[in-house]
Image (cartoon, helix red, strand yellow):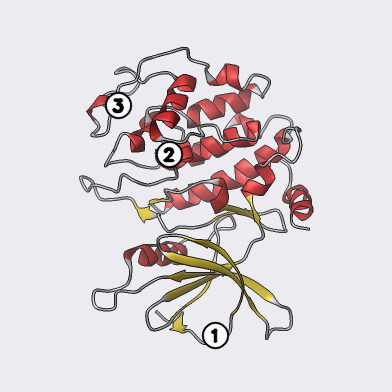
């Protein structure tokens, strides 16, 4: 790989941003330039020299080198030390979480929700166009820069769609954004898993709190079925054949229309299509972009308007 080089310690670490099973992420800077430039530096804990590169790192690099889009984070460069791989990404100050978290009791303007959702769906549609599943869509992995551009980040769990008949990992996607088929142990799934996660974030922006927050998997599934009802054979055929299927008794169903009463009719319709229990019935990202929700008043706000919100949060 021409873009991979030995680590030369040009980057100065400023602060650790996070840590996961893969390794650590730091905010770093290049001080020797005319204008100081900041990057997010991901350090993979190890590279298996005897057997090849760590598969998680290899997938992330391959996918982000392949896909270039305004709403997807960019790799700046790659380099490695004796035992570690480093990936430097463009650094972005603001996670979507900062915008969603309520600083007061005010609702987010619908035009702001539309502007952010439209960018999110455009990035997701591009990812899916390359036959890639992100598998970890959540507010912490959605970054909004000072120009008001939302970018999908952290492709550590991403992978290309498996060939027919090839099983995929079941334990993916953060719990609050995980669709029921993954909770039920589905080994074969597709783009609908990312759509469900995006729908959860859509709902979170409306209510300014996670839709399916729970301490355990049972808690979360109970909340899902309390809102959407218990899946039956006609709605979702053979769901009870999944390895991790759990039988739930039906209580009172709230419904999306009741829970989000007061939100626009078009918005509720889109949310229902994204949170369909049957993954095969969920709307695609490319279809969602064309949904009437984005063409009726109020129209999606501009990037410049989003930038004004971000500037107040990162001061």
Instruction: Residue 27 in the image: state x and y as whole percent.
Output: 60, 69
Q: Which quadrant of the rendered structure holds the C terminus? A: bottom right
In the rendered image, the quadrant that contains the N terminus is bottom left
**Is residue 249 shown above or below 98?**
above
Q: Which residue is mark 2?
A: 178
Q: Secondary structure at mark 3?
A: loop
Q: Are marks 1 and 2 in contact (CB under 8 Å)?
A: no
Q: Which residue, given by chain and number where applicable, does mark 3 sit on?
A: 246
Q: Residues within 10 Å of mark 1 (few under 14, many from 20)?
A: few
Q: Which residue is mark 1?
A: 9
Earlier in the chain: of badge 2 and badge 3, it is 2
In front: mark 2 or mark 3?
Answer: 3
Residue 114 pos. (x, y %): 66, 38
Assign a secondary structure to mark 2.
loop
Q: CA distance from mark 1 to mark 2?
A: 39 Å
Badge 3: residue crowd in 10 Å (few <14, some 14–19, many ≥20): few
């Amino acid at each position: 790989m021409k873009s991979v080089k030995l680590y030369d310690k040009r980057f100065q670490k400023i602060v650790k941003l996070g840590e996961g099973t893969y390794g650590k992420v730091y905010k770093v800077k290049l001080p020797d330039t005319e204008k100081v430039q900041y990057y997010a530096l991901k350090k993979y804990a190890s590279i298996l020299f005897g057997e090849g590169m760590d598969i998680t790192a290899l997938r992330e690099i391959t996918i982000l080198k392949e896909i270039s889009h305004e709403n997807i984070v960019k790799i700046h460069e790659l380099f490695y030390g004796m035992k570690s791989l480093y990936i430097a990404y463009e650094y972005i100050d603001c996670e979507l979480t900062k915008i969603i978290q309520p600083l007061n009791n005010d609702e987010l303007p619908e035009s702001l929700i539309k502007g952010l959702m439209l960018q999110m769906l455009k990035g997701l549609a591009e990812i899916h166009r390359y036959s890639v599943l992100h598998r970890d869509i959540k507010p912490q992995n959605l970054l909004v820069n000072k120009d008001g551009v939302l970018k999908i980040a952290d492709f550590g769990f991403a992978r290309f769609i498996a060939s027919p008949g090839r099983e995929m990992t079941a334990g993916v996607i953060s719990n609050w954004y995980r669709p029921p088929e993954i909770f039920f142990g589905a080994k074969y799934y597709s783009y609908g898993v990312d759509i469900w996660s995006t729908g959860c974030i859509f709902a979170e922006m409306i209510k300014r709190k996670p839709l399916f927050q729970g301490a355990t998997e049972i808690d979360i599934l109970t909340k899902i079925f309390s809102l959407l009802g218990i899946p039956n054979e006609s709605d979702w055929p053979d769901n009870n054949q999944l390895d991790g299927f759990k039988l739930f008794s039906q209580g009172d169903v709230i419904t999306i229309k009741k829970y989000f009463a007061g939100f626009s009719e078009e918005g509720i319709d889109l949310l229902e299509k994204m949170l369909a229990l049957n993954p095969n019935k969920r709307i695609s990202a490319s279809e969602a972009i064309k949904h009437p929700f984005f063409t009726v008043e109020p129209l999606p706000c501009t990037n410049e308007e989003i930038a004004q919100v971000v500037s107040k949060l990162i001061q």
